[in-house]
Amino acid sequence: MDELMLDGNAIGGLLQEVFAVEMTTAIGACGSCGTGGPVGAVHVYRGAGIVLRCPHCGNTLAKIVKSDSRVWIDLAGIRVLEVTV
Amino acid sequence: MAGTAVSGRLTWQLAELVEVIVETPHVKTIVLDVPSWPGHRAGQHLDVRLTAEDGYQAERSYSIASALDGTRVALTVQRLEDGEVSPYLTDELRPGEKIELRGPIGGYFVWEPSDRGPLMLVAGGSGVVPLMAMIRTRAAAGDDTETRLLYSSRSPDDVIYRDELELLSGNGLGIVHTLTDSQPPGWMGYARRVDAEMLAEVAPSPAERPRFYACGPTPFVEAVAEALVRLGHDSPAIKTERFGPTGR
């Protein structure tokens, strides 16, 4: 276990900044194992960028890199994202 | 979804420090007035942003400790010796001075009285903060949801909200402390880290379908969540919030 691991709650502000909607209750389905679950429960690793991993299989769900004025979001590991609007 | 709006872009706003409350040698509560606060739900957090004279910015998340109370918002902050933000908030910020914040943030690690229970809260150190917001919200609403708090601290001096927790207990709220490193003379309570045996003794049984909220340092939360699943509790009923190795 990595002590530096966080979870989706920790990036709630950043995600809401990008998507303009509360995202920790959004349901994501993993592109690898297919398990669905709330974004608040995914595993989050912070470094130069932010990596979101599936809590069930460890697959990389998403990668986020932020600069002062832009955000790059790689969602290749998420099959479906279901958001309450 | 009841309560405050879930949608909308977050904007930074100015908050004024109203009061500082010393909780333990390393922890203080800062009470802020946020004129345009839209309200919050128990378990939500907010982001604080500090800007240095040269433009350098540092941003941190802090759990909201208070129940909804107009434009007042309380944060309980653990001072991290090498921290960029927490020493400023706990030691330098003076009443009347302002900081930038945005929130409330989050909807997953949230409890409202209408969610009912039985509610099982498991706190490691300052992980008690969002759980205290739930306990305070429950009390303010006159709610009688069966609630238990299992709260792990290093020593008696490290127990945050000790007196208030004692006052609020009863009325369906049970509080169990474990003191991992040092105990007062005559201590009859738990004196070890939270483990499966302790959770089996303190938590409602799986048949009662309790709702779990566990918050603390990452290794603490991992151990609690694994033990609960092993005891037969339903994984989606176990909500977790991790704040890394040293606290937020």
Image (spheres, coloured by chain):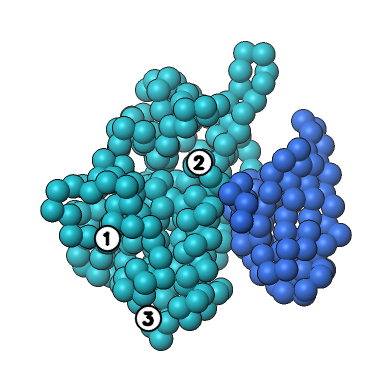
Chain colours: A blue, B cyan
Q: Position of residue B59 (x, y in %)?
A: 60, 33
Question: Residue placed at 33% from the left, 30% from the top?
Answer: B20
Classify A16 as above or below B206: above
Q: Which residue is mark 1?
A: B190
Q: Which residue is mark 2?
A: B246
Element type at mark 2: loop
Disc 3 crowd, CA 10 A, few/some/many (<14, 14-19, 20+): some
Q: Is residue B66 left or right of residue A26?
A: left
Q: Which residue is mark 3?
A: B205
Q: Are marks 3 and 2 on the same chain?
A: yes
Q: Amino acid at mark 2?
A: Thr
Q: Relative to the observer, which residue lies in front, B81 or B29?
A: B81
Disc 2 crowd, CA 10 A, few/some/many (<14, 14-19, 20+): some
* Discs 3/2, front: 2
Q: Are marks 1 and 2 on the same chain?
A: yes
Question: Residue placed at 25% from the left, 65% from the top?
Answer: B174
* Residue lying farthest to the left in this orientation: B186
Element type at mark 1: loop
Q: Are marks 1 and 2 in contact (CB under 8 Å)?
A: no
Q: Amino acid at mark 3?
A: Ser
